[in-house]
Image (tube, rainbow, N blue to C red):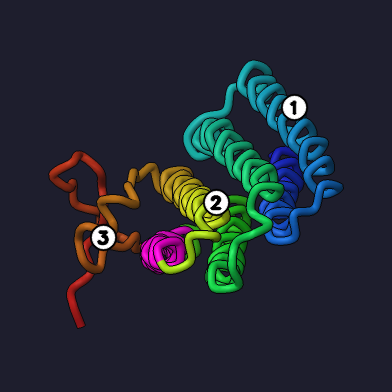
Amino acid sequence: LSKLNQEVVEMGALAQEMVSKGMLAFLQGDAVLRKELARMDREIYRQEQEIDRHSFEIIALHQPVASDLRKVSSCLKVVTDLNRIGRYGRNIAEMGEGSADHSVTCRFPLQTMSEQVISMVEAATSAFVNMDPKGAMDILERDDEIDKLWESIFRGTITCMIEQPQNISGGAYAILAARYLERIADHACNIGERVVFMVSGTRVDHYEFKRVPRLAYREGPTQPEPSTDGYYVTRLDEK
């Protein structure tokens, strides 16, 4: 399992790099970076296939049970999320050519949003490797801020497009880029959910987490209560 952990760390680092370079290519309209992202996309796909192969090999040859089985099965899902994160990074980069005319007004919120999203992906990968459910739940809490940024960028860019029609094309690309970043954050939350399941056998859904105030996973003897959606969470009293 230590080798599997290392492979996930490497794939997570590549996914983060793809998002970072994707945003740079988008903001600068960098054709060289777009080509590099295409190469990185092939590499992250190769890594996903290798981790899948290694995971099934562990299941077939070692027949893991309990927490070890949850670790391997969660890994199979996490690498799918990491692959999608990397692919969104490439998608953002590919819009760079058409976004050259978007205004400075659209750039700064996108940069802030991308930095927070990349931080979430890094934290999600770390929580998975270190089997850290508290860190995983912290990621779910941060998703609200990303949603607010997405809504702010959407509204601000629409206003910019109305007031400055020459920026309509670039504004449309900015909205798409922000949407891709929001989806990357959702995939980071998916990884957080896998961590909680991997450690405790407990399922938690980040959409449920956002609907009900102060939902959290808590270690210790307290057993989580089933929610109306069939997911298991522990409810913390309001302070």
Image quadrant containing the N terminus? top right
Label 3 or label 1, whichever lies nearer to me, is: 1
Image quadrant containing the C terminus? bottom left
Looking at numbered disc 1 in the image, what kind of residue is underneath it? Glu
| Residue at the limit of the structure toward the top, as seen here | 60
Image location of residue 191, percent across then percent down: 50, 47
Main SS class of the magenta portion in the image: helix
In the picture of the structure, the residue carrying the numbered disc 2 is 169
Q: Residues within 10 Å of mark 3 (few under 14, many from 20)?
A: few
Position of 105 relative to 59 (above/below)? below
Does residue 184 appear in the picture of this structure? no
Label 3 or label 2, whichever lies nearer to me, is: 2
Q: Residue at x 71, y 25 (%)?
A: 49
Q: Give the mark nearer the N terminus: 1 vs 2.
A: 1
- Say left or right for 146 vs 117: left
Image location of residue 184, percent across then percent down: 53, 49
Give yes or no for residue 11 being in the magenta stretch.
Answer: no
